[in-house]
Every structure is written in structure tokens, then in C-alpha cells.
Image (tube, rainbow, N blue to C red):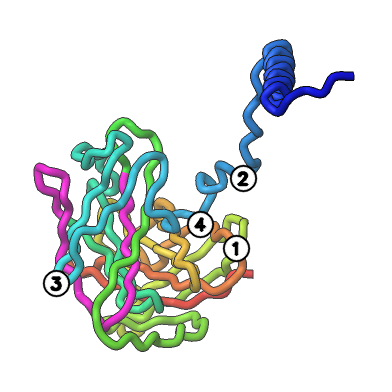
């Protein structure tokens, strides 16, 4: 049997490979295109996270610009441009919460917006360290509001303060506020906050942003955010809310109320079971 020369052997090998690829290509055409792998089941998990844990959601992003004596930021929309049209909610286009990561230094602010879409608000920096800024707003044309959160830093030696122990009463500016009710994770929890001054019930609270009180709850650890407005009722001494926290654990509660033309903030630590 004749022996093939080296060039001939190489040519036969190449022809064989070409045949193999042709068969494979034909099989591919017969079978159709390969389907992409299915998306993971948790791909939309971000849509179900508690409010305030994301810097971006539903195409909107919170973009901090400067943090010092004032906080400057903008909200970028799905088109990548700063948002300049909002729906007013509770008297304001946007509510801004600033708090230190150890849950101290809470501030409920109402920044102003310039024509380019940049927001600014004076802030009170109560100590060095990481702060969390929450922007609570409703973009124009969107039915549901959004709460986006971002970390901003104050330079210096950060020494976090321990979270105060759970308590039923808080004192602020000569007022005593008593918390009634308990938080239950994943369930609607009725709460009542009773306001007194020098032992006398306060029954003439001023409306503040269209209500007799505003309650913010932040989860210790990750600062998951909940902003609750009160049920319709008299101007004190009790302001009633229904709150639903996402999990068991400790929360810091901040009640804003107005009396005599001044806004006061009572703070509590509460345990959700």
C-alpha cells in the first residue's frame, strides 16, 4: 500500500477537519439557535428590598455632590439627566433625612432645588464619621414614591456611640413623649405617641407638613428606612400610627411634631419581635 507524503497527510487531515465543521454547522442550522440561559430567579430581588438601602432603583439614582456645612446632590432619571419635575408630597417635592451611621444626629430637612436639578440643604454635622442621606420623593409622572440612600462622610476620628437601650419615654425640649404599642416584624403594628409638657397633655399640636406628626424608623445595622404618616385624629395628646417593619431587631424611631410654632424630634429605641 503506498505511503502518503507529509504534505499529503496534512492535506487529508485538513480536509477531515473541514468535514467535521461542516457537519456540526449543518446540525446547528437544523437544531436552531441555542437559547440563552434563564435569568436567575432572584434577578428582581432589588425591587423588594426595604426602602433606603439602594442608591439606585427603577432607573433613578441619588448622586451626592458635596457634604459639609451643606449637602448638595441631584436625582438622575432613567434618561441619565437630573430630574427637575416632581410631585409634591406632604407639602414638599423632596424630603431629606440625614443621620449618622450609629443612628445619632438625626435631621429631617427640606432642601431647595435649582433650575439644573441640584438640591442643597444646610446640615448639622454632629461628629466625624459616615452619615446616611435618604431622599424621599415622587418623580412627576410616577405613581409610587421612591426612597434612595447614599453614604456621605464627615472627616475626622469616628467613634460610634452605642445604640440607646429600648425605652418607652423620651424627653425633648421640655416635652415628654410616651410610646405605646409594640413593633411586630412583617405585620401592621399600631403605635400611639402621647405628648405632654410639664406633666400636662398637649392637645393643641400644630399641623406639620399636613399632619400632626411624622414618624421615621431606621433599622439598626443597615439603616433600612420606613417613613410613616399618622392616622387622622385630634391634635393630641396622642398621635397614632400604623407601622410595618420588615424584620425582627432593633429600630430607632424618630417622631417629628410641631407645637407653638417649633418642630421637635423625640427619639426612641424599639425592639421588633
Q: Are marks 3 and 1 in contact (CB under 8 Å)?
A: no
Point out the image quarter for the C terminus. Answer: bottom right
Residue at the location (70% across, 12% down)? 26
Q: Nearer the viewer, residue 167 or 223?
A: 223
Q: Position of residue 84 (x, y in %)?
A: 19, 39
Q: Nearer the viewer, residue 255 or 174?
A: 255
Residue 36 numbered tag: none
Mark nearest the camera among 2 and 3 is: 2
What is the magenta range?
112-137
The residue identified by callout 2 is: 42
Mark nearest the camera among 3 and 1 is: 3
The residue identified by callout 4 is: 242
| Up/down of 212 relative to 181, above or below | above
| Up/down of 72 relative to 164, above or below | above
- Is disc 4 surrounded by few (<14), some (14 to 19) or many (20+) residues within 10 Å? some
Whole-number angstrom distance, CA of label 4 to CA of label 2: 30 Å
Is tag 2's residue or tag 3's residue first in the polypeptide sequence?
A: 2
Magenta-span inclusion, residue 133:
yes
Residue that extends furthest to the left in the rendered view of this protein? 115
The residue identified by callout 1 is: 247
| Up/down of 85 relative to 273, above or below | above
Residue at the location (50% across, 85% down)? 165
Mark nearest the camera among 4 and 1 is: 1
- Is disc 3 surrounded by few (<14), some (14 to 19) or many (20+) residues within 10 Å? few
Residue at the location (35% across, 78% down)? 104
Secondary structure type for disc 1:
loop
Residue 69 numbered tag: 3
Whole-number angstrom distance, CA of label 4 to CA of label 1: 16 Å
Amino acid at each position: 500500500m503506498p505511503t502518503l507524503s507529509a504534505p499529503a497527510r496534512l492535506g487529508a487531515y485538513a480536509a477531515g477537519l473541514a468535514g467535521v465543521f461542516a457537519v456540526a454547522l449543518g446540525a446547528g442550522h437544523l437544531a436552531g439557535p441555542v437559547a440563552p440561559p434563564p435569568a436567575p430567579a432572584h434577578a428582581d430581588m432589588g425591587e423588594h428590598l426595604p426602602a433606603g438601602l439602594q442608591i439606585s432603583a427603577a432607573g433613578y439614582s441619588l448622586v451626592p455632590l458635596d457634604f459639609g456645612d451643606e449637602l448638595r446632590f441631584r436625582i438622575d432619571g432613567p434618561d441619565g439627566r437630573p430630574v427637575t419635575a416632581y410631585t409634591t408630597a406632604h407639602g414638599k417635592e423632596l424630603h431629606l433625612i440625614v443621620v449618622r451611621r450609629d443612628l445619632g444626629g438625626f435631621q429631617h430637612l427640606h432642601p431647595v432645588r435649582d433650575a439644573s436639578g441640584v438640591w442643597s440643604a444646610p446640615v448639622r454635622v454632629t461628629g466625624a464619621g459616615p452619615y446616611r442621606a435618604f431622599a424621599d420623593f415622587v418623580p412627576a409622572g410616577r405613581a409610587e414614591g421612591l426612597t434612595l440612600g447614599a453614604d456621605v462622610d464627615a472627616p475626622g476620628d469616628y467613634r460610634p456611640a452605642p445604640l440607646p437601650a429600648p425605652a418607652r419615654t423620651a424627653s425633648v425640649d421640655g416635652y415628654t413623649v410616651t410610646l405605646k404599642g409594640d413593633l411586630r416584624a412583617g405585620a401592621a403594628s399600631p403605635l400611639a405617641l402621647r405628648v405632654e409638657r410639664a406633666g400636662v397633655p398637649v392637645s393643641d399640636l400644630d399641623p406639620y407638613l399636613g399632619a400632626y406628626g411624622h414618624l421615621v424608623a431606621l433599622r439598626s445595622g443597615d439603616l433600612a428606612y420606613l417613613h410613616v404618616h399618622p392616622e387622622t385624629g385630634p391634635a393630641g395628646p396622642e398621635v397614632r400610627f400604623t407601622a410595618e417593619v420588615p424584620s425582627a431587631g432593633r429600630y430607632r424611631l424618630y417622631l417629628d411634631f410641631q407645637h407653638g410654632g417649633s418642630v421637635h424630634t423625640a427619639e426612641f429605641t424599639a425592639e421588633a419581635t
